[in-house]
Image (spheres, rainbow, N blue to C red):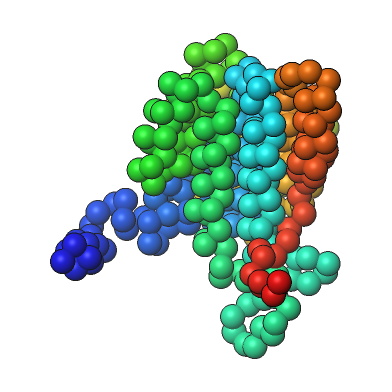
Amino acid sequence: MKRVMTCVVLAAMLTGGCTPVLKEVRYSGGYPGYLLDKRTFDTSASKQLFLLRAAIILSMAAEMSRVTVTGEDGDTVAKQLFAAAQEINYAAADIYSIDGKSPCDTTGDAGDDCAGFYENFEGNIPQIEARVVKVMLAVLPADRARKFLDNATKGDALAAAWHAIRTLAAAVGGVHFAAARYRSGLEIVAVHMGSQCKAPGGVSVAGKYDASSQTVIEAAGCLGLSQENLSANPDEADRIALRGDNGGEVKRGAFQAVMHAIAVACYDLPYHGDEKTVAESRTLRSSTCTNIKFEPKGRPHEVEAP
């Protein structure tokens, strides 16, 4: 009877105008994606940009570990960062080529050697969120972790992580660690916007954003973000402008930069214990931190017989 009632309630929600459920079944990234588009930058017009934002949030959590993680928890955080990075690589297999072979489409016989399918990308998002949740629980102090988990279990994991990082940064005085990684993310997004850059007032920036000669101030202007007000950005770039000149393509170098930052934060995690314990930790981190890279790979799906 409970299953029947659940189906009836779900059917009623799907046919009604409930915003969370409506966004969950029709919006890029579901309802959490919708919330993050309002709180960060709009990735709804590009799967690659959506994945980049998830990687940026992971990098912010990695940076926060510098001020929240003790040596006793260093190995746990290293393992969680590596696992989360792997989830991003699995998702990337559905939107990036591997060894020169593009993801398969569903308009014909794809064969048996497909690492990924463009249409399967959305299915990766909950698994990335689950890994980010584990990273956040490992990084956050116990009291903050409980609050974060309460929010994350409502189906809003990435947005909950975003909120937790911002509030924790202010609380422990480590705002520069997480925010600096986000600023770097803004520069990457601005570079990919190309000639679609905007400046305050909606006036086009002359040329494109150049990270080698400009700073995050110009990058924020490229996205139409105000230097005076955090929440009021009437000139903010819309979803189409954020697709840039290349139809929403995000170059691999963008992910390589973010993954490099995560690997560095992982490398810098503190150690704990005697010489033997530290040696064991170094061995573990040589197989985790060292292998945090952007390498799209097909999600395992074949079970080998023993």
Residue under the image location 54 percent in, 13 percent down: 172
At horizontal 65% and vertical 19% (from top left) the residue drawn is 70
Q: Is residue 217 left or right of residue 159?
A: right
Percent across and percent down for residue 267 are: 78, 30
**Residue 135 drawn above or below residue 141:** below
For this view, does 39 lie left or right of residue 300? left
- Which image quadrant for residue 2? bottom left
Quarter location, residue 304 = bottom right
Q: Quadrant of the N terminus?
A: bottom left
* Residue 274 horizontal side relative to residue 248, left or right: right
Percent x, y for residue 57? 59, 37
Q: Position of residue 155 (x, y in %)?
A: 39, 46
Q: Position of residue 151 (x, y in %)?
A: 38, 36
Q: Nearer the viewer, residue 151 or 78?
A: 78
Q: Is residue 261 visible?
A: no
**Any part of residue 24 in sight:** yes
Q: Residue furthest bottom?
A: 109
Residue farthest toward the top in the current orientation of the protein: 173
How many numbered marks are there? 0
The residue at the point 58 percent across, 56 percent down is: 46
Image point 29% across, 52% down: which residue? Answer: 19
Q: Nearer the viewer, residue 173 or 278?
A: 278
Image quarter (top left, top right, bottom left or bottom right) of the C terminus:
bottom right
Indicate the quadrant where residue 59 lies: top right
